[in-house]
Image (cartoon, rainbow, N blue to C red):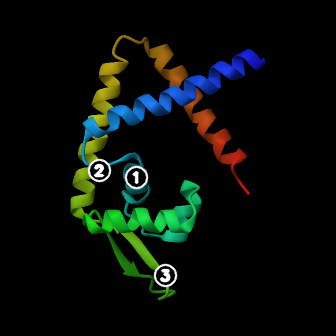
Amino acid sequence: MDRILDIIEYEIALLNRLTNAISPKLGKLDRSGYILLSKVINGNPAGINEIAEELKLNVSTASRQVAALEEKEYISRTPDQKNGRISLITITDLGREVFNSVKKARTDAYAAILHNWPKKDLEELESSLSKLNSALVLWNKP
């Protein structure tokens, strides 16, 4: 079992490195911007605290990421009508355009990378990655 866990740990570290290496080739968003925009793309305004909690970030990190996206005019802040001290984050038309462009580039890249995989293998990869991400979220809860 230790050998399997050693290999899994290494493969995940390598996956992170390789996906980060191709990310700049896929558009104007880095990984953190892409993930943050994916949380607000559906039109549901969210506060920074909510975003930080969902993405497992501390509030100062989430605030910096929001500020960087706001500076690029990919998101906007509006006061929460229920609590004026809270700003709600929404995606702008430009942010939606950039996100959709990067998402398409990422999807096209994975289609090219995985083009010769059988559908069954792709389904297993999808299932395994979903299970892993769910387990990571549960393990990382306070």
Q: Amino acid at mark 3?
A: Ile
Q: Quadrant of residue 110?
A: top left
Q: Secondary structure at mark 2?
A: helix
Q: Quadrant of residue 124?
A: top right
Residue at the extreme right of the image, as rendered: 1
Q: Quadrant of residue 108?
A: top left
- Quick one: label 2, few (<14), some, or many (20+) residues within 10 Å? many
The quarter of the rendered structure image containing the N terminus is: top right
Q: Residue at x 24, y 43 (%)?
A: 27
Asked whether the beta carbons under mark 2 and mark 3 sit within 8 Å of each other, the answer is: no
Measured along the vertical axis of the image, is residue 53 above or below residue 11? Answer: below
Residue 25 image point, x, y percent: 26, 35
Residue named by callout 1: 38
Real-space Cα separation, disc 2 to disc 1, in angstroms: 8 Å
Q: Amino acid at mark 1?
A: Ser
The quarter of the rendered structure image containing the C terminus is: bottom right
Q: Amino acid at mark 2?
A: Phe
Q: Secondary structure at mark 1?
A: helix
Q: Nearer the viewer, residue 52 or 124?
A: 52
Residue named by callout 2: 99
Q: Residue at x 49, y 81 (%)?
A: 86
Total number of numbered labels? 3
Q: Residue at x 40, y 52 (%)?
A: 38
Is residue 135 shown left or right of residue 119?
A: right
Q: Residue at x 59, y 55 (%)?
A: 56
Residue 9 image point, x, y percent: 63, 27
